[in-house]
Image: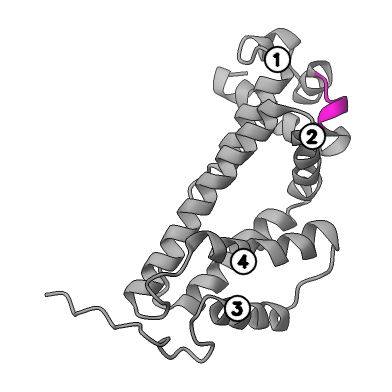
Amino acid sequence: MLRKDITSAIRRALMHELAAVGYGRLSIEAVARRAGVSKTAIYRRWSSKLELVLEIVSASAGRKLPTLDTGSLRGDLHLLFGVVVHALGHPLAAQIIPDLLAEAARNPQIDETLQQVLRSRQQEFGGRLVGRAVERGELPPDTDPDLAVDLVAGPLYWRLAIARTPLTDAYLDSLVDTVITALGGSATGTRPPGATVPAARS
């Protein structure tokens, strides 16, 4: 097996093992068995199970995001909802995320890493979403990007990871309207009070 194939196998095995048993019961031996490699192959790449988990979870969370630029805030929100629903609805993520969040309360290193990843994602998503909506005149200039992400991720995380309630198109459409209104925009697509349309670029 090539070196890169071994690393990929270890990463896949880690995610499946983490979903199956949680961080507390996770062992390098079990990951090695699932990956079909020796423990030495893992320890050559990562010094401990904590380092292994933190690096791979960070890499998974840091994957390239789609461009949130559909031409309207409504379209961008629907795209963002799709990304979040896909991520939270994945069987592995549905098992891993709650476990790691619980473990973060006991492990400062996991907590710090998750906070860094979440803040980075929040700033990237929120900055794109709100920045373009403000440029288009769909949201007021003082719209808070962090609030926008909270309004998007909070309800979806609750429904998918906590309540485990199926999402319908009607619910998502209603949530789009609610988020736009809460941010000071108009659910009908008209410009909010005080917003201006940016000048045409030459």
Please identify the quadrant where the C terminus is shown: bottom left
Mark pair 3, 2: CA separation: 32 Å
Q: Secondary structure at mark 4?
A: helix
Residue in the foreground of this view, choosing between 45 and 23: 23
Find the residue positioned furthest to the left: 202
- Label 3: how many residues lie within 10 Å, few (<14), some (14-19) or many (20+)? many
Residue 24 is inside the magenta segment? yes
Q: Which residue is mark 4?
A: 152
Residue in view at x 79 percent, y 34 percent: 103
- Label 4: how many residues lie within 10 Å, few (<14), some (14-19) or many (20+)? some
Q: Is residue 56 visible?
A: yes
x and y, in percent, of residue 163 in the image: 86, 63
Question: Residue flagged by tag 2: what amino acid is it?
Answer: Glu
Q: Which residue is mark 3?
A: 176
Residue in the foreground of this view, choosing between 38 and 124: 124
Between label 3 and label 2, give the one nearer the viewer.
2
Q: Which residue is mark 1?
A: 48
Q: Which residues are magenta?
A: 23-27
- Label 1: how many residues lie within 10 Å, few (<14), some (14-19) or many (20+)? few
Q: Earlier in the sequence, mark 4 or mark 3?
A: 4
Q: Which residue is mark 2?
A: 103
- Is 21 on the left-hand or right-hand side of 168? right
Task: Tell me which corner region of the image, top left, top right, bottom left or bottom right, holds residue 174.
Answer: bottom right
Mark pair 4, 3: CA separation: 8 Å
x and y, in percent, of residue 188 in the image: 51, 92
Task: Tell me which corner region of the image, top left, top right, bottom left or bottom right, holds residue 149.
Answer: bottom right
Mark pair 2, 1: CA separation: 16 Å
- Is 158 on the left-hand or right-hand side of 144? right
Question: Residue flagged by tag 3: what amino acid is it?
Answer: Val
